[in-house]
Image (cartoon, rainbow, N blue to C red):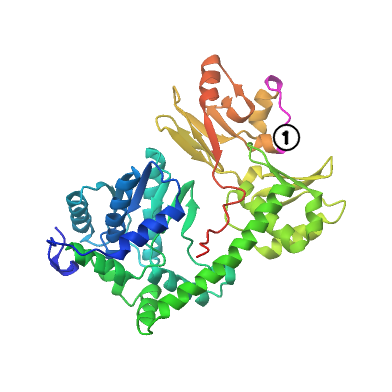
Amino acid sequence: MVAVSFLMHVPVVAVNPPIHTYPNRLTAMMAMLCAPAPARLAVAVSGGADSLALALGLREWAELQGCQLTALVVDHGIRRESAGEAAQCMEWLAAHTIDAVLLPLQIGPMTNGVQEAAREARYAAMTQWCHAQGVMHLALGHHQGDQAETVLMRLLRHSGPEGLAAMAMRSEREGITLLRPQLRESKSAMIAYLRGLGQRWIEDPSNQSRQYLRTQLRHLIATHAGAAERLARVADSCGQYRAALEAQLAADIEAYVTLDDAGYARIGTALLKAGDARAAQVMMRVLCCVGNSGEPRLAEVERLIAAMRVELMRPRTLHGCSVQRVVGGMWLVTRELGACAPAVLWHEQPSVMWDRFRLEGVLPKPCRVEALGEAGWLQIRGQVSTTLPRAAILALPALWDLEAVVAVPHIGYAQSAVMAELAASFRHSRAKPLAAPPFWVMNT
């Protein structure tokens, strides 16, 4: 059980809980964030006041909407009390008839970046659960104070307006829609709501530790009345600016870029007439998608755009991609073969992630997934008919049995009738989208 020092002591049950406006505001926000309501919704619950209030408030909303709500409780294992806290949280959720799933993590000891590593591990565990269960919406408990802290952290890192937009109320991560319906709510409103219900919550001592930058900023904001609200308004204003830029970027991508399911892109030369700044932003997104990594340096992309203006530019490699001019006045961006991910084994697991692709299906025997490459293409090139560029073909995911290629799903190749039947059922998707949905802002 959780140590007493980590719990807020209030009556366990309130006989006549007062009516609060917090659930009403939460309901109104959910109506704007996801209309119509999804059939299933997950909510991240740590046991703190913010996430616990969110779970209880969403329970009321979910019942009205006919939505199946599941709380995800992550035991990060960093502190010795975490297992007891997670168990206590599960008990509280059960008492409120909220279905809950415990997700234990194994995070080894570390001295630097503890909060960042734990946060990434939590997100990974929750998104994996959502994918496995077919739940496409995950609600998070970030509130106004969290937004204010994020703005200050971005300022210290010299972020521009796009970075100062901080967290969006609605965003996507690995195909899962993340909802932050209480991003404009103060933590005091959530505490008042829980106290009215007679519900205790967990206080994580690391949230008060001055050794972390975020908690130092939290104490700074607390000493200035109204600071959290003003900083959150900065995020709202910068969010409007970021949304406009991303909408323009999405329009440019649609106008100038064609992305093939085989993971390569064709770019029309008309992009260069849009101006260097817009062309660089489009090329950056293409390189991120095809190269399966974070953003390249802007200076490198700008040099590439300048080179593309030269008629006889030689093929170039940048950020795990190869860029070359092709017949028809187009630019071809393909995955650089030498930058592809190493082989992974695929057998009993329902899906496997390799380089830019997720493949799903059931195999009769273990196979390794790796790039087709020159050796693989020599094996099968006389047995397939495809119009894909050779550079794109070589970087496709292929299923290998020892040194033999047994299937290449993207070009319909299979070594046998059994593999052909299986390959036809494979679902394959890219890991990184070409253009993410524009930054979500609320015009109220």
Q: Is residue 68 left or right of residue 410?
A: left
Give x and y (percent) for residue 134. 40, 39
Q: Residue at x 46, y 78 (%)?
A: 230
Q: Residue furthest right?
A: 311
Residue 256 visible to an observer of this rendering:
yes
Q: Is residue 217 left or right of residue 47?
A: right
Write the start and end of the magenta stretch as one range.
382-391
Q: Residue at x 63, y 37 (%)?
A: 261
SS assignment at label 1: helix
Nearest the camera: 221 or 236? 236
Nearest the camera: 437 or 104? 437
Give x and y (percent) for residue 340. 59, 43
Give x and y (percent) for residue 31. 42, 53
Q: Residue furthest bottom?
A: 224
Q: Quadrant of residue 241?
A: bottom right
Q: Is residue 221 above or below residue 27?
A: below
Quarter of the N terminus within the rendering: bottom left
Residue 296 visible to an observer of this rendering:
no
Q: Decide: few, some or many residues near mark 1? Use Cα within 10 Å; few <14, some 14-19, many ≥20.
A: few
Q: Is residue 18 left or right of residue 395?
A: left
Q: Is residue 124 above or below residue 9?
A: above
Q: Quadrant of residue 22?
A: bottom left
Report which residue position mark 1 lands on. Answer: 390
Q: Quadrant of residue 380?
A: top right
At label 1, the amino acid type is: Arg
Q: Residue at x 46, y 72 (%)?
A: 232
